[in-house]
Image: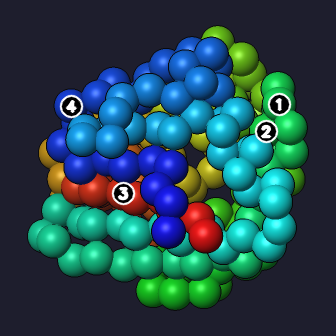
Amino acid sequence: MDVFQNRFDGSIDFYRNSTDYENGFGNLFTEFWLGLGIMQEIVSNGPIELRMDLTDGDGTTVYETFQNFHLDAGPEYTIHLDPGQGTAGDDISDLGMSYLNGMHFTTKDVDRDPYLPENCAQGQHGAWWYNQCGGVNLNGEYATPGFQHPKGYWFGIFYQPYSFNSLKATKLMFR
């Protein structure tokens, strides 16, 4: 499996602009984001499975897999994926990754989410495929794992179907 997002200690600031998210940042030995341009090129070559591994503050790990994952070409990088299967809860929630199917990627400087009152990336201190600023913010601000972010759970790294608390680690992969 190829990793395209890895977070585990907050050493890299993920509150970045669209150019950084398109080109990638960090490195393979620390936290990193591979880059939307590279990801789109790789996942355009056939049926791709997305796997998400999440670790909570107490070390509990859950996962979810999504079939038929692909991204449209930039600048929107619209995400497409089937409903998830696994232990993170996508199948029981309308606020998991499958809720983001068809959403464009939003950053602090480029608002492509459908939520009209604000830019979800600014409001949630992150960058993601937001749908009405929904229940996933895996590129949010790193906070004390296992607890809600002091400004509210939506600022931290969270996956609402699993936990409102800030996650300790996230890894996104595809094959």
Residue positioned 82% across, 60% down in the render: 45
Q: Earlier in the sequence, mark 1 or mark 4?
A: 4
The image quarter containing residue 18 is top right
Q: Position of residue 129 (x, y in %)?
A: 68, 44
The residue that label 1 is drawn on is 74
**For mark 2, what is the residue?**
77
Q: Cβ–Cβ below 8 Å for labels 3 and 2?
A: no
Q: Nearer the viewer, mark 1 or mark 3?
A: 1
Give the quarter of the figure containing the C terminus.
Answer: bottom right
Q: Are marks 1 and 4 in contact (CB under 8 Å)?
A: no
Residue 114: where, in percent of width, then height? 82, 36
Query: Which residue lies under the disc numbered 3?
Result: 170
Q: Read off the residue under disc 4.
A: 11
Q: Amino acid at mark 2?
A: Tyr
The amino acid sitting under disc 1 is: Gly
Q: Is residue 75 above or below residue 68?
A: above
62 relative to 165, above or below:
below
